[in-house]
Image (cartoon, rainbow, N blue to C red):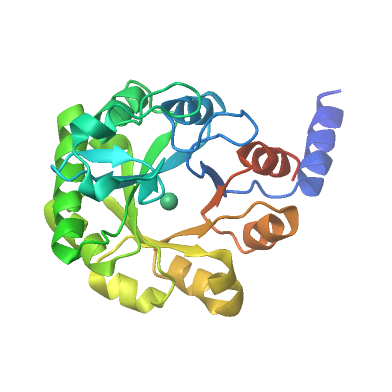
Amino acid sequence: MKLLLIVSLLIASAFMQPESTTKVIAHRGAWKNTHVPENSIAALQHAIALKCYGSEFDVHLSADSIPFVLHDHSIQGIYIEKTTAAELSKIKLSNGEPLPTLEAYLAAGKNQNQTRLILEIKTSQLGKARSLALTKKCIELVNKTGVASITDYIAFDFDVCLEVKKLAPQAHVQYLNGDKAPEALAAAGLNGFDYHYSVLQKNEGWLQDAHQRKLSTNAWTVNDEPTMRWLIERKVHMITTNEPEKLQALLAHR
Ligand code: MG
C-alpha cells in the first residue's frame, strides 16, 4: 500500500510542471475588476486582499514639496506640480476618497507584509532638480512611515534611479525606460529592469542575460494571456498588469 502511494506520487510529480516563479504586480493597484479609481488607497487594499506580490503606484511632488499619489501630471484640470498640498487635499477621487498623499498611502500599506509597495517616482516636467527633490522626499517618507523593508522603487529617469541607490543603498531599484541593456544596469549598481514587454520581445536575450547577472526582471503593462505566457515561459520574475486576477488564475493553472 505504501509502495503504491510512493509510486503514485512519483508518477504525479513527473507530470507536474515546475512551479512558476513569476510574481504578480498590480499596476496602480487592483482597480479594474474591483471598480475603484487607479492609484486610490482602495485599489491598494484590493491588491493586498488579492495577495499580489506587489502593488504599483505613481508619485508627483506638489508646488510646496509634498508627494501625492497619482499617475497623470494633472487631475480635474489641476496641475499637481504647480498646486499646493492644501489645494490638492481638497480633490476627491471618483470613489469619494481624497487624492492620497504619499504619507497616507504608505500608512495604508503598512502593517502587512503580503504585498510590496512598488513606488514609481515620476519624472518632473519642471526639471531634473524637482525629480531629484521628489526622490529625496519619497525616501524620507518611506523611512518615516516605517515601510522601507516592503518598498521597492522604479523610475524612468536613470538619474533618479541612481539617486535612490545613493540615498538608500539597501533599496531595490528597477529602471523603466527600456533603453539600457542588462550590462549597463549591473554596472550602475541597479537591481534590475522593469521594461515594457515589447522591449523584451525585441531584445530576446535581455531576460536571460539579466538573470545570469542576478538582476531582477519585471515587464509592464501586460494584460493579455499570450504575452503573459510568453514572459512566464522566459521566467520573468514579475509581471505588472491591470488584470492581476487573470494573471493569478493563469499562474495557478500552470
Ligand atoms: Mg506607473
- Relative vertical location of residue 26 with respect to residue 188 in this rendering, above or below: above
Where residue 44 sits: x, y (%)?
A: 45, 30
Q: Is residue 101 left or right of residue 166?
A: right
Q: Is residue 83 left or right of residue 41?
A: left
Where residue 60 sits: x, y (%)?
A: 28, 47
Q: Within the image, what quadrant is residue 119 found in?
A: top left
Q: Residue at x 35, y 31 (%)?
A: 99
Q: Nearer the viewer, residue 25 or 20?
A: 25
Where residue 177 sits: x, y (%)?
A: 40, 68
Q: Nearer the viewer, residue 242 or 4?
A: 242
Residue farthest along the front direction in this orientation: 77
- Relative vertical location of residue 87 with respect to residue 74 in this rendering, above or below: above
Q: Residue at x 17, y 46 (%)?
A: 63
Q: Is residue 138 left or right of residue 43?
A: left
- Relative vertical location of residue 161 with respect to residue 181 in this rendering, above or below: above
Q: Is residue 146 visible?
A: no
Q: Quadrant of the N terminus?
A: top right
Tag count: 0
Where residue 241 sits: x, y (%)?
A: 58, 48
Q: Residue at x 24, y 66 (%)?
A: 189
Q: Within the image, what quadrant is residue 162 found in?
A: bottom left
Q: Residue at x 40, y 50 (%)?
A: 72
Q: Is residue 45 visible?
A: yes
